[in-house]
Image (tube, rainbow, N blue to C red):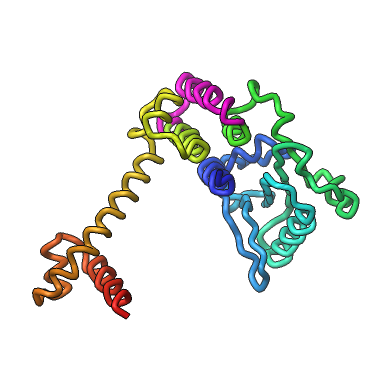
C-alpha cells in the first residue's frame, strides 16, 4: 500500500488534522497549509511541513514525519532536515514543533539516547496510532488509523466511518472529501478486488467518488493514446499533415505530435 501517497493526500486536504495530535494547537490551525519542501543545496526533502497563514502571530512551523517501517536513522535524518530548513528560513518563523507518527512503538528507532535533547523536549511529540482510543477520536485521526487496519478489520471500520461522516453535521463538500479518502485507502488496500466487490464492502457507489472518476479519466486517456498510436501512422502515410490529422481526429496537435514521435523512435 502506498502509505506515503495516502498521507500526503490526507494532510494536503486536511492540514488541520495534524493539530488533533499536538498539545500546542495554534490559534490559526484551520488555515495552515501543508507542503513537501526540498532543502536546497542538499539531498534532503522534508515530506511534511505545515506552514502558518500569512500575517499570523506567532509564526509557528510544524514538521511531521509518518514512519511505517523500521529505520534506525530516522531521528538523525528528521532532526537534521528540520534544523537545516529552520537555518535557511530564519525570517519565516518564530517557533517550531516536530511530530513523529508511528503505527506502534515497535517501529521507533532503538537509539533514543543520541537525540534525547529533542525527544525529551516539549517541542517534539511522538504519536503511536495503536495506542489511541479510536472510537472517541476525531474523524481525521480515524482516517489515519484506517491505513493501519488489517484487511479483515478495514471493511468494518471503513463502513463505520462512512456512516459516521454521513450522519454528522458537516458540509457536503467536506463529507465527499472524507469519503474520497476512505475510498482511496480501500482501493489501495484491496487492489485485487473488482469495483463491484469494493462497492459491496464499503456500501457505496464508486462511480460517485473522486478516486473512481480519476481512474476513469486516466483509463480514457490511455485508450485515446492507444487509438492515436494505431491511427496516426496510417493517416501520415496518406500525406496528411499533423494539423490535418489533429483536426480530423478532434484532438490537440501536441497529442498527434507525441504519437508521431513514438513512431519515429520505434523505427530507429
Whether the magenta-drawn stretch holds residue 172 is answered as yes
| For residue 152, above or below residue 94 | above
> Residue pushed farthest bottom?
268
Q: Residue at x 47, y 19 (%)?
A: 167
Question: Is residue 31 among the parts visible in the rendering?
Answer: no
Q: In this orientation, which residue lies closer to the viewer: 137 or 130?
A: 130
Q: In this orientation, which residue lies closer to the viewer: 149 or 181?
A: 149
Residue 213, percent across and down?
Answer: 34, 41
> Residue pushed farthest right?
113
Question: Is residue 41 among the parts visible in the rendering?
Answer: yes
3 left or right, relative to 116: left
Q: Residue at x 27, y 59 (%)?
A: 225
Whether the magenta-drawn stretch holds residue 87 is answered as no
Q: In this orientation, which residue lies closer to the viewer: 159 or 265?
A: 265
Q: Residue at x 64, y 40 (%)?
A: 18
Residue 89, percent across and down?
Answer: 68, 64
144 left or right, relative to 79: left
| For residue 42, above or below residue 181 | below
Residue 99, percent across and down?
Answer: 72, 45
138 left or right, relative to 118: left
Residue 64, percent across and down?
Answer: 67, 48
Question: Which quadrant: the C terminus?
Answer: bottom left
Q: Residue at x 32, y 76 (%)?
A: 265
- Main SS of the magenta part reads helix
Q: In this orientation, which residue lies closer to the viewer: 8 or 103?
A: 103
| For residue 64, above or below residue 176 | below
Tally of marks: 0
Query: The magenta stretch spans which residues?
Result: 150-175
> Residue pushed farthest front?
267
Question: Which quadrant: the N terminus?
Answer: top right
Amino acid at each position: 500500500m502506498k502509505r506515503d501517497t495516502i498521507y500526503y493526500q490526507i494532510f494536503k486536504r486536511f492540514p488541520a488534522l495534524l493539530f488533533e495530535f499536538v498539545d500546542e494547537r495554534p490559534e490559526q490551525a484551520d488555515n495552515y497549509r501543508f507542503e513537501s519542501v526540498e532543502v536546497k543545496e542538499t539531498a534532503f526533502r522534508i515530506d511534511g511541513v505545515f506552514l502558518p497563514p500569512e500575517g499570523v502571530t506567532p509564526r509557528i512551523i510544524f514538521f511531521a514525519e509518518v514512519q511505517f517501517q523500521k529505520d534506525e536513522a530516522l531521528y538523525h535524518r528528521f532532526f537534521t532536515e528540520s534544523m537545516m530548513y529552520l537555518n535557511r528560513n530564519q525570517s519565516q518563523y518564530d517557533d517550531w514543533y516536530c511530530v513523529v507518527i508511528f503505527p506502534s512503538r515497535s517501529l521507533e528507532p532503538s537509539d533514543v539516547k543520541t537525540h534525547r535533547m529533542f525527544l525529551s523536549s516539549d517541542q517534539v511529540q511522538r504519536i503511536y496510532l495503536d495506542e489511541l482510543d479510536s472510537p472517541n477520536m476525531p474523524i481525521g485521526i480515524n482516517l489515519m488509523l484506517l491505513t493501519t487496519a488489517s484487511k479483515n478489520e478495514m471493511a468494518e471500520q471503513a463502513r463505520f466511518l462512512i456512516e459516521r461522516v454521513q450522519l454528522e453535521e458537516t458540509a457536503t463538500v467536506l463529507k465527499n472529501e472524507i469519503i474520497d479518502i476512505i475510498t482511496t485507502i480501500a482501493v489501495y488496500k484491496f487492489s485485487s478486488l473488482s469495483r463491484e466487490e469494493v462497492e459491496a464492502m464499503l456500501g457505496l457507489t464508486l462511480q460517485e467518488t473522486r478516486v473512481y472518476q480519476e481512474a476513469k479519466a486516466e483509463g480514457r486517456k490511455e485508450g485515446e493514446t492507444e487509438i492515436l498510436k494505431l491511427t496516426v501512422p496510417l493517416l501520415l502515410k496518406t500525406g496528411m499533415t499533423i494539423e490535418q490529422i489533429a483536426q480530423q481526429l478532434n484532438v490537440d496537435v501536441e497529442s498527434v505530435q507525441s504519437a508521431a514521435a513514438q513512431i519515429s523512435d520505434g523505427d530507429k
